[in-house]
Each structure stands twice: as structure tokens, then as C-alpha cells.
Amino acid sequence: MRLFVGLDVSLAKTAICVISEHGKIARETQVASEPEALLRWIKDQYGDIAAIGLEARPWSQWLHRGLSEAGLDVVLMETRQVKGALKAMPIKTDRRDAEGIARLLHLGWFRPVHCKSVSAQEIRAVLGARKAVQQGMIALEMSLRGLLRNFGLKVGAVSRGRFEHRVRELAAGNPMLEAATDPML
């Protein structure tokens, strides 16, 4: 018997629903959101696993990779399409979402999404971290400019490398501002 497995992934637990080729729920459970735990559970199933489906999210890509490397047919499903289909359910739970994902997989009513390679994910993570640091630096710079403006002090146009020196220069002579710009506090 062919089985279709729907996974609703959350940070700690993954809700699993297995639907037979006839559309009947064969089994439901929850396991830890780890590839090894999912593999152990899936290998204990009786029947031929036709496909495993899960929504495309950052956490899902890691699980997709782990399950695919074990030789399973895993499908990342387009998130907006799955969300739209599951929205029609009157009661929204992880268990029901897993069932809905399994049914979409069984019926073929989904759009598969490409799973990015590990190197592409690493590059994206580095670029995301770089952007977060840049935005943090800009926010701090603007905050310092605003605080100094309250005292009638203008930083003006300075390069990033000279910004700290300019702020210390403006704060010199004012004990409160000197204390505020001291990195040891």
C-alpha cells in the first residue's frame, strides 16, 4: 500500500499524518523536529512511502536535506499555496495541518519548491548577518547623532572610520557625554 506522509514542522515537534492511497488516515503522531527522529519513525511504517511533504520554511530545508540524504522522496511545498488550502479548515491545529499537507500531497494539489544547496544557504546566512550588523551600526550612529543634537552638537559628514573620533571630540569637556561615550561603561 502506498502512503503519503504530511509533516507540519514546528521548532520542537513535528506533527505527522500518514494517508493511504485510498485517502484514509493510516497513522498520526508527533516526533521531535530532528531528521534522525523522523527517519526512525518513518522507517517503522508498513507500506511503501510514496512521498513525504512539508511546507517550505527555513527549518524545513534542514529536515528536507536529512530525509533526502536517507533516500526518501521528500517534497517542499510552496508555502502560500499550502497556507491557502489549509485556511479552509474550520479547526486549525498542527495535527490538522499535517493531515492537510498529506492530503495535498496525495491529491497532487501542490507546487513543489526547490531546496537550496547548503552553500547557497551559507551564503545567504552570511549576507543576512552582514546586513543585520550594518543596520545595527546605522541605527547606533543615528541614535548618537540625535543624542548629541540635544546638546547643540553636530557630528556632520564623517567617514565611518572617523565617526568615533568625531563623537569623542564633540563630547570632550562635558563629563556626562564623556561618560556616555566611554566604551568601558
Image (tube, helix red, strand yellow):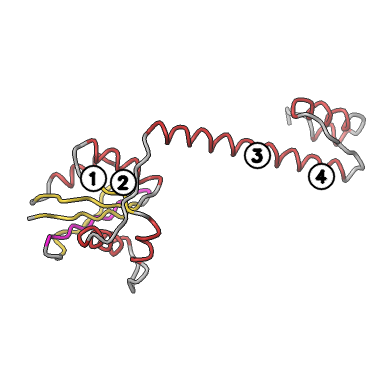
Locate the C terminus by quadrant: top right
In the image, what residue occupies the spot 59% across and 38% down?
Answer: 131
Crowd around label 2: few <14 · some 14–19 · many ≥20 (10 Å)? many
Q: Secondary structure at mark 2?
A: loop
Q: Position of residue 30 (x, y in %)?
A: 25, 54
Label disc, if present, on residue 33 of the rendered structure: 2
Q: From the top left corner, tell me how far across and down residue 74 is, in percent.
A: 24, 46
Disc 4 to disc 1: CB gap under 8 Å: no
Residue at numbered disc 1: 38
Q: Which residue is mark 3?
A: 136
- Identify the element where label 1 is drawn: helix
Amino acid on which the number 1 mark rests in the picture: Leu
Which residue type does callout 3 highlight? Answer: Gly
Q: Which mark is residue 146?
A: 4
* Disc with the residue nearer the chain's start (4 vs 3): 3
Q: Please tell me whether residue 75 is drawn above or below residue 154 in the rendered image.
A: below
Q: Which mark is residue 84?
A: none
x 79%, y 32%: residue: 181
Q: Earlier in the sequence, mark 4 or mark 1?
A: 1
Disc 3/disc 1 C-alpha distance (Å): 38 Å
- Callout 3: SS: helix
